[in-house]
Image: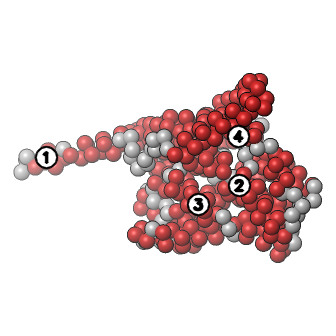
Amino acid sequence: MSALIIDIILWGSVAALGFLAWQRGRTVLVSSAREGTMDFIHIVPRIALGVIGSGYIAAIIPQQVITGWLGPNSGWSGVLAAVLAGAATPGGPVVGFSIGAVALKSGGGAPQVIAYVVAWALFAFQRLILWEIPFMPARFVWFRAAVSLPFPFVAAAIAMAIGRP
Amino acid sequence: MSLSDPLSKDPAPGLDEAADSGPNRGRKRKPIDLATISIAVLVVISAALVYRRDGAEGIWEILRHDLTLFSGILPRVLAGCLLGAFIAEILPHEKVSRSLGPSSGLKGLLIGTAFGAILPGGPFTAYPVASALLTVGADFGATIAMVVSWTLIGYGRAVAWELPIMGTDFTLWRIVISLPLPILAGALGRFVYLRIYPKDAP
């Protein structure tokens, strides 16, 4: 159901922007559609490698290993372990959030789990390699990941300061 | 005088043609690069380890699952690429570099953050669109703000995955705590960028 909504919004946006391009002339529409299609053709092999290969990477990094890093460590050493665990977590959002939920239920501290989720969202290595590098200039991707490094710690600090969640 | 007319007009269509149909207009497409090779190596090693542990059955099971995933994602990747290409075409370069370029200040970071937060879809839209913004004149700072905002405060992943798995309380507080981060990340990105690449300074 939510997949259907995503597709409707997505192709609706494509149609709306395509219409705007068409208003500037047929050649504008045709050339940019061709440009997008060429991008697609160039990206497909990389996405294929990433998506089809990521199952194997996820299979050899079992969730228990990651959950172990998110264990009972508290304080800043726990935050550091959580950040490393977030960066190393393979697979999609289900895996990342499930590990976070398990950590919360088994007594992990909220700031540590916040740091884990934020680190995973910012620089999970598999998403960098699978999604970001194929689409964006590599120089930008590494730069963005490096600049993002402090922010899981900032998020943990805010969580500790306000005592939430 | 009559000669100068066709002469002056002649180069224009040729240039337009080259600009429109050149395969590298604006964006450069990378050949097979180091990152791709390293993933390929990583995948082969992982697959070998899976084979040793689970045998051929394990290899097939993962392959079947991932092929299904891949075929589902493929049309969305196409949509994302088209979105990126249309945005690169429609958005006026001059306006984008004014509102999202290196001298756009806090306003540029705020626009990037807002854009990332409302962008629909998943990674298949966020990254092509971010790439298109870079092409039409956004700087690293504003683009970082957009990507970080999409990943941290974008509603897509939060509603679809985080809310049901992590619960409302955690998700809402996680988002509240994340609110300042895209702007801070964009500002840090700009600060560092100017020190690494001083020649690109505005």
Q: CA distance from mark 3 to mark 1?
A: 48 Å
Location of residue B23 (image quadrant): top left
| Residue marked by disc 4 | A57
- What is the crowding at mark 4: few (fewer than 14 residues within 10 Å), some, or many (at least 20)? many
Q: CA distance from mark 3 to mark 4?
A: 24 Å
Give the percent coordinates (x, y) of residue A43: 53, 39
Q: Are marks 3 and 4 on the same chain?
A: yes
Of tags 1 and 2, the one toward the viewer is 2
- What is the crowding at mark 1: few (fewer than 14 residues within 10 Å), some, or many (at least 20)? few
Nearest the viewer among A46 and A165 is A46
Q: Are marks 2 and 3 on the same chain?
A: yes
Amino acid at dot 1: Leu
- What is the crowding at mark 3: few (fewer than 14 residues within 10 Å), some, or many (at least 20)? many
A80 vs B75: above or below: below
Q: CA distance from mark 2 to mark 4?
A: 14 Å
Q: Is residue B173 left or right of residue B2?
A: right
Q: Are marks 2 and 4 in contact (CB under 8 Å)?
A: no
Q: Which mark is residue B7?
A: 1
For label 1, the SS is: helix
Chain designation of label 2: A
Of tags 4 and 1, the one toward the viewer is 4
Give the mark nearer the N terminus: 3 vs 4.
Answer: 4
Give the mark nearer the N terminus: 2 vs 4.
Answer: 4
Q: CA distance from mark 1 to mark 2?
A: 60 Å
For label 4, the SS is: helix
Q: Which mark is residue B118?
A: none
Q: Image point 41% across, 39% down: which residue? A: A31
Q: CA distance from mark 2 to mark 3?
A: 14 Å
Q: Image point 56% across, 57% down: which residue? A: A142
Amino acid at dot 2: Ala
Nearest the viewer among B69 and B163 is B69
